[in-house]
Every structure is written in structure tokens, then in C-alpha cells.
Image (cartoon, grey):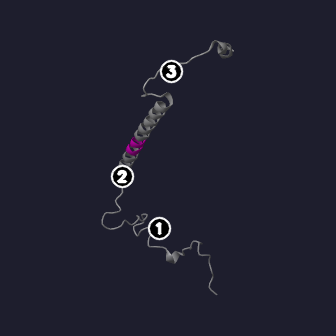
């Protein structure tokens, strides 16, 4: 009777199933096998230093963009809150002598 294994159980390789070189995942030369890249140069990756420079530049640009956005937001909020760029106007306030006692209390 054949044994039934769960579909997610990893298969065990017997010594007869190992690739030439004696280790699972090894190439015939004994070195670990390299991942296959798609043909046509589409799988070309950036080197580590190029990738680091790209990430650093991206972070600098994102930080500068965020700072510019916050600066405009703060300036606009201050303009609305304090009434900057509005025309000055004179307002006349009349206080009756009866109300002076209520104001100073």
C-alpha cells in the first residue's frame, strides 16, 4: 500500500535521488546552484552600492518633499490663523461709563 503524505510535507530525498555532487541544491561542480535569470537581460539587478545610493537618494528626495509640504502647510495655517495679508481696518468701540465697572472686575 503506498504511503500518503500531506501535500505540504517536504519530500525527503534518498541518496539515489541526490544530484551529482552529493548535496541537495548543489550543482555538479559542488558549488551551490545560482538562481536562474530570465533571458534577454531583464533579470539584471543593481549592485549593492548602486542599490544603496539609489535608496539614499530616494530618502533624501522624499525628506525634502515632505519638508516643503509641511512648510507650505504651516505658512498657510499661520496666514489663516493670524489674518496675515488682510487689509487693516479701523474699528470704533464705544464704552459707556456705566459699563466700566463691569469691564474691570
Which mark, residue 47? 2
Q: Is mark 1 on a helix, strand or loop?
A: loop
- 92 to the left or right of 46: right
Q: Main secondary structure of the magenta part?
A: helix
- 75 to the left or right of 100: left
Snapshot quadrant of residue 58: top left
Badge 2 density bin: few <14, some 14–19, many ≥20, Cα 10 Å: few
Q: Please name which of the two marks, 3 or 2, marks the residue nearer to the observer.
A: 3
Q: Are marks 1 and 2 in contact (CB under 8 Å)?
A: no
Q: Does the magenta stretch include residue 58?
A: yes
Q: Name above or below for residue 67 compared with residue 19.
A: above
Lower sequence index among marks 1 and 3? 1
Measured as percent of width and height from the top left, residue 80 is found at 48, 32
Measured as percent of width and height from the top left, residue 51 is found at 38, 49
Region in magenta:
57-62
Lower sequence index among marks 3 and 2? 2
Q: Name the residue under label 3.
A: 91
Snapshot quadrant of residue 35: bottom left
Q: Is residue 54 magenta?
A: no
Q: Name above or below for residue 48 compared with residue 102.
A: below
97 or 45, which lies in front? 97
Measured as percent of width and height from the top left, residue 16 is found at 51, 77
Q: Are marks 1 and 3 in contact (CB under 8 Å)?
A: no
Which mark, residue 25? 1
Amino acid at each position: 500500500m503506498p504511503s500518503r503524505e500531506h501535500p505540504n510535507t517536504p519530500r525527503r530525498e534518498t541518496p539515489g535521488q541526490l544530484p551529482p555532487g552529493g548535496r541537495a541544491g548543489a550543482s555538479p561542480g559542488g558549488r551551490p546552484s545560482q538562481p536562474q535569470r530570465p533571458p534577454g537581460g531583464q533579470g539584471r539587478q543593481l549592485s549593492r552600492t548602486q542599490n544603496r545610493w539609489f535608496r539614499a537618494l530616494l530618502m533624501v528626495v522624499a525628506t525634502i518633499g515632505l519638508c516643503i509640504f509641511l512648510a507650505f502647510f504651516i505658512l498657510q495655517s499661520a496666514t489663516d490663523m493670524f489674518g496675515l495679508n488682510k487689509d487693516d481696518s479701523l474699528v470704533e468701540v464705544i464704552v459707556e461709563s456705566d459699563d466700566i465697572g463691569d469691564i474691570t472686575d
